[in-house]
Amino acid sequence: MDSRRIDVFALHHELEDRLGIHFKDKSLLTRALTHRSFLNEAPLVHMDNERLEFLGDAVIDLLVAEVLYQRFPEQREGTLTTMRASLVRRETLARFARQIDLGKYLLLGRGEAENGGRERDALLCAAFEALCGAIYLDQGLETAASFLYPLLEPMLVPLAHGELTKDPKSRLQEWAQTALGETPHYVTVGSTGPDHAKEFTVEVWIGQDVYGVGVGLSKQKAAQQAARAALEAIAGRE
């Protein structure tokens, strides 16, 4: 066995100890942590985590829905749906991934790793979903719930007060005013395409710095994307 494979085995054993979950089928854990960029550099590895991501997304949806149903019996379906969307969105799941230091254990291609893949929200979210899918397949829904619920619990109080259901622009404004004493402003820097399908590019500035760039079919959508990119960048630095 080469040194790289030994390092992978040791890292994954470390993650199991950290989670308190020891997989019966170790290949499920390896697959959950394998990004597609790794396949080109590891000829003996043939499966990435995308199928487990698909399954884990459904597992998380079910478990979050059950928690909300039990904890908020007074809320109607529409409100519960909004609350669930806040808990399963990319930024939230990426936050959970960071809490367990999941990026450290991912198998990434060298280019992806060098470009900051271990801290990218989209990649962390996908890996977290894949990990939940792997836990479910290996040890069942009860163990998956035991893993997920402690991560969800601290979110429920702010969720009940509506603090997690705000759009990216609102959340960025609150952060900027609290952390920097500044209010973000949005600048449309370009547009492309015909009038009936024009795409706009918007930058969000806080003080003298650009914090994020977004593209959308309207200036408002582009601004929301810029705010989301800014929040991801801020989360990556914290």
Image (tube, helix red, strand yellow):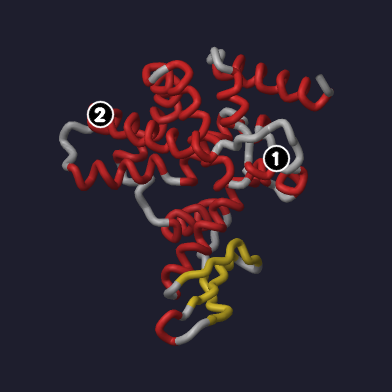
The amino acid type of the residue labelled 2 equals Arg
Q: Position of residue 136 (x, y in %)?
A: 43, 23
Say which label, 1 or 2, has the lower sequence index. Answer: 1
**Residue, disc 1:** 38
225, above or below 2, in the image? below
Looking at the image, the residue that sits furthest to the right is: 3
Name which quarter of the figure residue 210 lies in.
bottom right
As helix, strand or loop, the secondary structure at mark 2 comes to helix
User: Mark 1, mark 2: which one is toward the viewer?
Assistant: 1
In the rendered image, which quarter contains the C terminus? top right
Label of residue 82 in the image: none
In the rendered image, which quarter contains the N terminus? top right
Foreground residue among 207 and 190: 190
Rounded to the nearest whole Å, what is the CA distance between mark 1 and mark 2? Answer: 41 Å
Q: Position of residue 208 (x, y in %)?
A: 65, 68
As helix, strand or loop, the secondary structure at mark 1 comes to helix
* Residue at (65, 35) in percent of width and height: 46
Label of residue 71 in the image: 2
* Residue at (69, 40) in percent of width and height: 39
Q: Position of residue 78 (x, y in %)?
A: 21, 47
* Residue at (57, 28) in percent of width and height: 100
The amino acid type of the residue labelled 1 equals Phe
